[in-house]
Image (cartoon, grey):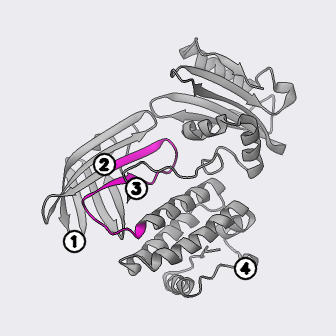
Amino acid sequence: MFAIYLRHAVALTSLVLACTAHASSFDCTDATSKTEKAICTDPYLSTLDDKLAEQWRTTLGKVADPKMLKTDQRQWLKNRNACGALSACLRREYLMRLTELEHAVQPFSWDATWQLIPRGTSTSATLVTQRRNATHIAIDISAGEGANSGDLTGVAILKDGTAVYAEDACKLAFTPINGVLNVTQTGADSDCGGGMGVYYAGRYVASEQPLKLDYDLLSLGLARTPAEDQALRSLLKTDYQKLVETSGSLQVGENSKDVPDAQVVEMWMRGLGGIGILMSAADAQVWLIFKSYDDQGHEHLRYYTNVAKWNKRLPDVLQDWYDRMQESQSSLVLEMMP
């Protein structure tokens, strides 16, 4: 596996170089950090780590500026290690970095269409850049977060390799990192023409089509363990992917008196409000309500559980959530799924 523990800058430099030369992976018997231990105990994370090692070797041998890539990898390792032992965070970091390394080998051009590498399934952004002359880059960004959106057009000034757009309180900086474009934003969402929660910052890769990463309910943080994820896959079947695509943001819900040791998570999406609630307990027991849409776009709610005694009734916290939904949408129908 490719995981490298950051101890200090000098040691890290030698480790990166050693990894390049020997393609070595750390020995799980020597794992010391929370991140290393989490990777070693999670087969999926271990597989992602191996894939990243292979992609790193391939990308490093092909990019225009290997030194820049190594510097960027050090920063990514810091970001990854900041996840600690959180599986969802680590999975997202690996999936995003794999996508980035795959595209980094492309020759960079200011005349391109770019897609944001999204941190979740409810986030997207498309950026079009066009070089007008030696010092001016035209930019056109469209972004979305849930049902909210934002658009910005203008001209950025190119100096020392970075193009900067500045208008009132909004400042965007566009910096090439080999074949990838890094965008930073100074200013609030509304300062830059975005709806609530809509920002343009992130890593972009040259692509005409929006990116779809291999996110699942584990990488999105909705399922806590592989066993829970598998239970939800078995229970939801084709609705599993619908839930992945609409899970949105998560917040901890109220504790249940009916199932005292359960964890409750509510799902909501910018511009749409509450879209679901999941309660999970030991032995991969799950209770779920989420909004679904038919082919005509009509909303309805679906209730799933793998606990037999709750097949036809709702535990307290799910009932409370459903009652709140009906206060604003009394026509919402709750389907008790088999």
Mark-to-mark CA distance, 1 and 2 = 23 Å
Label annotation for residue 160: 1
Q: Residues within 10 Å of mark 3 (few under 14, many from 20)?
A: some
Label 4 belongs to which residue? 30
Q: What residue appears at the point 72 percent right and 41 percent down from the top-left corner?
A: 233
Q: Which type of secondary structure does the marked residue at label 1 adopt?
A: loop
Of the numbered discs 1 and 2, the one sitting upstream in the chain is 1
Name the image quarter holding residue 177: bottom left
The range drawn in magenta is 104-127
Mark 3 vs mark 2: in front: 3
Q: Which type of secondary structure does the marked residue at label 4 adopt?
A: helix
Report whether residue 190 is seen. Answer: no
**Mark 1 touching mark 2, by CB under 8 A?**
no
**Residue type beneath disc 3:** Gly
Mark-to-mark CA distance, 1 and 3 = 20 Å
**Residue type beneath disc 4:** Asp
24 up-or-down from 88: above or below: below
Q: Residues within 10 Å of mark 1 (few under 14, many from 20)?
A: few
Mark-to-mark CA distance, 3 and 4 = 34 Å
Q: Residues within 10 Å of mark 4 (few under 14, many from 20)?
A: few
Of the numbered discs 4 and 2, the one sitting upstream in the chain is 4
107 drawn magenta:
yes
Mark 4 vs mark 2: in front: 4
Of the numbered discs 1 and 4, the one sitting upstream in the chain is 4
Label 3 belongs to which residue? 202
Label annotation for residue 187: 2
Mark 1 vs mark 2: in front: 1
Report whether residue 291 is seen. Answer: yes
Residue farthest toward the top in the current orientation of the protein: 330
Of the numbered discs 1 and 3, the one sitting upstream in the chain is 1
